Image (spheres, rainbow, N blue to C red):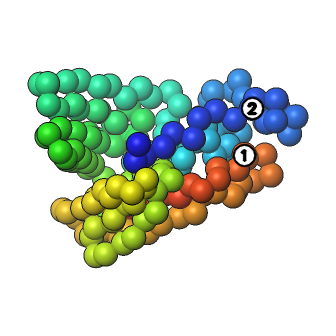
Amino acid sequence: RWDKDLGMQDYNSLERRGIDLWNMKPGSPRWLVFRLGSDAHNTLTLDGQSHSSTGMATLTMPDVRSARIDLTPVLGVAAVRTAHFADDAVTLVDDVEAAPGRTIRWAMTTQAAVRLAGETAFLTLGGKQLAVHFSGAPIMLSVLDVSEPRQDYDAPNPDTRQLLATAN
């Protein structure tokens, strides 16, 4: 498995530190917890903002080898991710209609080792390798270590990093 969902964090560990987990409103402290917020997930974010907690992305299957996710309600701008599945590859197409100067961030949380070369990231895990190639708008690739907690209330995520692609 190349990407990783970090899973839940023990609610008691958060409630003891005063985090109101049951407040689902936009801007609530709940969304500052790394594992619960948008930053930890394998998705797009815009200008470092959390997804709208009142929005709901929709998934449709145009055919048996493709999926379409409308992220417009969670990002606040027209945004659609389409996945095309081939026998040995997946092509993701992100179409985001953001105003110039806004920063679009694509993230993939993984336990794989990541090596960057131009617009390609090579992931290695369990003796296997995956090449992730980016094309289209100019992007900047980076790797962010997310193994250590960001805040004192966050849980550690041992041997975990994020492959990031950002575009303006």
Provide residue 129's location: percent of width, then percent of height: 32, 58
Q: Is residue 154 above or below residue 114?
A: above
Residue under pointer 1? 155
Q: Residue furthest bottom?
A: 118
* CB atoms of marks 2 and 1 within 8 Å: yes
**Which of 167/83 is in front?**
83
Q: Is residue 30 above or below residue 126?
A: above
Q: Is residue 125 above or below residue 87?
A: below
Residue under pointer 2? 10
Residue at image location 61% in from the left, 41% down from the top = 35
Sort mark 2 into few (<14), some (14-19) or many (20+) by Cα contacts within 10 Å. Answer: few
Please indicate, yes or no, whether residue 117 appears anywhere in the rendered image: yes
Provide residue 63's location: percent of width, then percent of height: 11, 25
Q: Secondary structure at mark 2?
A: loop
Provide residue 42's location: percent of width, then percent of height: 43, 45
Residue at image location 65% in from the left, 53% down from the top = 158
Q: Quadrant of residue 163?
A: bottom left
Residue at image location 63% in from the left, 46% down from the top = 34
Query: Which mark sits nearer the N-terminus, 2 or 1?
Result: 2
Relative to 95, is 113 on the left or the right?
A: right
Relative to 51, is 11 on the left or the right?
A: right
| Residue 38: numbered disc | none
Relative to 130, is 21 on the left or the right?
A: right
Give the amino acid at mark 1. Answer: Ala
Q: Secondary structure at mark 1?
A: loop
Provide residue 26's location: percent of width, then percent of height: 59, 35
**Which of 111/37 is in front?**
111
Please indicate, yes or no, whether residue 48 appears anywhere in the rendered image: no
Give the amino acid at mark 2. Answer: Asp
